[in-house]
Amino acid sequence: MKVAVRSSIKINSILESILALLLVLECNTVYQRMIDVNLHMDWLCIFVACLLAYNTLRKGVLRKSIRYVYIFIAILVVYLVLSFYKSNVISFVSLFCLFFLAMMIYLLNKENEEQILSIYRRFSGIVVYLTAISTMIWFGSEILHIFQPNMEIEIAWGNEHYVRGVLGLFFQCQRDTTFGLGDFYRNSGIFCESPMFSLVATFALIYELFLRGYYKKLRIAVLCIGILSSITSTGIIMLGVCFGLVYWKKIRTGKKWIKILYVGGLIILLPAAFMLLQSVLEMKSTTGSYSIRMADYIIGFRAFLKHPLTGTGFNYLANLLVEKEHIMASFGMKVNDVGFSNSIAAVLGQGGVYLFIVYLLPFFKIMFLGVKTNKRSTKDVVAWVISFLILFCVTIFHAKYIMMYFLAFAYSSWIAMRKSSKNIVI
């Protein structure tokens, strides 16, 4: 019996590591967008998640967890019925009805904090290693000019084009003169754009800062350097937000003289942070990206006003084309794609208030429960939620499998926190 249990735990550990890697690769990497070879990252994510759920069901599940799963099934089926004619049904079923539910079955039956965080912990470890390697290659290639591209892959990103890579761990995807630093390729790692690389690295960073329980300074330093080398305004702002929240924690938990010192530093740093944010926004406003981002918020809100309950249809972007053409024309720009640049407008416009609540409810519930308690661990979770919601508002990942994992993680955490006020499980 003990041998069988150990074997099951070992298999789950391997599957968790595989899933963590797939969640990274599925998040708009060059390997996901290859034209010649389709690796079907989405179906691989579903397959591994279903294996984890199957192993859980085979061992027996908690009765309460099954009740929650039934509730989620009912919620998802109702939305599917209401929006069937206008949604991308395959995408909705794949993301929500298969992957999300499988993750809920698996995470709801975890026994403690360490187990609930296990996939996220593995995800962070993988991202740290990828960031370290890709940043070193980027520095050697773009700054020192030691490494030369030794491969070329055709990808479908915006349009079909070739990108050159070094050792398959850094690809030359985005070349511009961002922030006046000269004409060179930004560090995008294995991703199609540097903002996606920055996003995934930030996911790992907020785990290391707020959920690990202690600081691994080398990991944090690697992630920060990687985010800075991506040269993205969102990445720079998020670094300020994350370390501002760390600063806030120290003020709340430190001794009186430490609080005075930190408050004094905060008075000095806030104006500097404001000026940095202002300069970034001014610089972005001179480019098309600023107009596109602003237009996307307006488009999402207008689509919500026209279809308040279920939106224009989950992940069915064609329904928004006319609306986007009209808004972009008011900015004096043409529509090059139908996609969004931020998740909150996409969810509100495509899913209406129905999916908006499904996406955001657990995060706000966790914040509410966290504010009510004085435990340090729950304050850390609140800081993580704040960071995550900011990312949700300024970057696009609402229809990626990493979002479905975080959604299942948030619901599982909220349910676990409700179960016990004495021993709060993150």
Image (cartoon, helix red, strand yellow):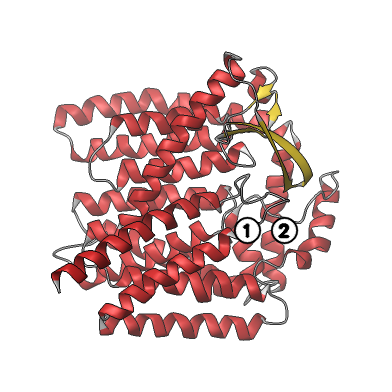
Image-quadrant location for residue 316: bottom right
Which quadrant is home to the C terminus?
Answer: bottom left
Local packing at callout 1 (Cα closer than 10 Å; few below 14, some 14-19, many 20+) is: many
Q: CA distance from mark 1 to mark 2?
A: 8 Å
Numbered label tally? 2
Report the residue at 58% width, 15% height from top. 146
> Which of 6/265 is in front?
6
Q: Are marks 1 and 2 in contact (CB under 8 Å)?
A: yes
In the picture, the disc for residue 345 is: 1
Residue at the (23%, 40%) spot, across then down = 214
Which amino acid type is shown beneath numbered disc 2?
Ile
Q: Please provide percent x and percent y for residue 322.
A: 83, 62
The image quadrant that residue 299 belongs to is bottom right
Is 53 located above or below residue 200 in the figure? Answer: below
Q: Earlier in the sequence, mark 1 or mark 2?
A: 2
Q: Quick check: 261 above or below 391?
A: above
Q: Is residue 420 visible?
A: no
Residue 182 seen in the current view: yes
Q: Is residue 173 left or right of residue 144?
A: right
Q: Residue at x 36, y 26 (%)?
A: 267
Q: Is residue 1 above or below residue 121?
A: below
Q: Where is mark 2, residue-wise?
A: 299
Q: Residues within 10 Å of mark 2 (few under 14, many from 20)?
A: many
| Left or right of 181 on screen, residue 364 | left
For residue 370, the mark is none
Quarter of the image that includes the N terminus: bottom left
